[in-house]
Image (tube, rainbow, N blue to C red):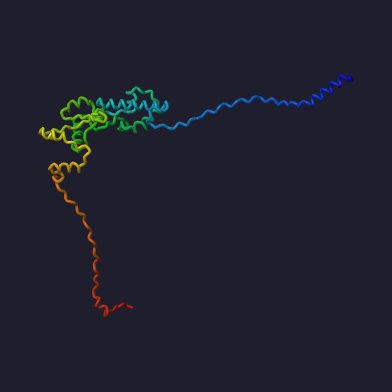
Amino acid sequence: MDKALLKDRDAFIKRAFASPLEVRKRSQPPSTPEPPKKKVSKSTPSEPTSYKTMSGGSQYKFGVLARIVRHMKTRHQDGDSHPLSIDDILDETNQLNAGPKVKQWLVTEALPNNPKVQEVDGKYLFRPALPVRDRKSLLKLLRQHDMKGYGGVLLDDIQESLPHCEKVLKQLDKELLRITRATDKKQIIFYHDKGINFLVEKEFQQLWRNTSVDGLQDDNIEEYLNKQGIKSMQDTGPKIKPIRKRTKKSRQRATKISDNEHMQHILQTYDNN
């Protein structure tokens, strides 16, 4: 063999031993990334009356219910007192497209549990805040409140409960008193009892208006009256005697009377043997 070739071969072997061998890794197929898992948010159940936070189906159902209650209230204020079936109610409110599930929910849950609706023999009526139907019943209610010290009645409750309210209130204008409440500016209707009307001299009116009793208790008012030489009225009413508690009498044991104890030494028994 040619010496030049042998020399080249030896040089190649030396270079091969001098440099490290590179081990190629087996090519692996590229791994496909896993799709991210969707987080399922657990929604807390909302209250049954929270209309805005409900799902679409619940909002629709409660929208149907609200429309029914408004219609029943309008019927009552117009003087319609006959009850309606669920089909008649849906017909009059133009909601015949309500499905059977919504209709079943209205009959079994919504209408029976609604405070503004009452059921009468399978049909439904509006439940007003006050038991008044006409002028006489309203006047009777206001008289009872006045006699029993209940005070007045909210105008809003009268308007909700009394059919043709404005017409009736105009008829009773001379027998009513209207007071506007300072806290919420709502009107309170009182019965005007003309039997207690009497004239008061201007001198007493001025004294009444100038006397301030704000923040004073009954004891302070009584002390002030005594200093002014005015006797308080606490002793002018009928005197009530205190009720005496009955004391239970102790029962004495009855003495047992034994007869013929002094004859015991001569008594004999005659038993038949």
Location of residue 178 (image quadrant) = top left
The spot of residue 79 in percent (x, y) is 24, 26
Where is residue 198 shown, x and y percent of the image? 11, 34
Q: Is residue 39 above or below residue 259?
A: above
Q: Is residue 236 left or right of residue 62?
A: left
Q: Toward the viewer: 186 or 129?
A: 186
Q: Is residue 246 above or below residue 161?
A: below
Q: Is residue 70 above or below residue 214?
A: above
- Residue extending farthest to the front is 227
Q: Nearer the viewer, residue 112 or 155?
A: 155
Q: Position of residue 104 (x, y in %)?
A: 38, 30
Residue 221 image-quadrant placement = top left
Which corner quadrant holds the N terminus? top right
For the point 39% across and 32% down, which residue is it?
Answer: 47
In the foreground, 166 or 26 = 26
Asked whether residue 234 is in view, the answer is yes
Q: In what quadrant of the picture does the C terminus appear?
A: bottom left
Decide if residue 199 is in sight here: no
Q: Answer with left or right where residue 234 lies relative to residue 21.
A: left
Locate residue 224, reporting x and y percent.
17, 41
Q: Is residue 103 left or right of residue 152?
A: right
Q: Residue furthest right?
A: 1
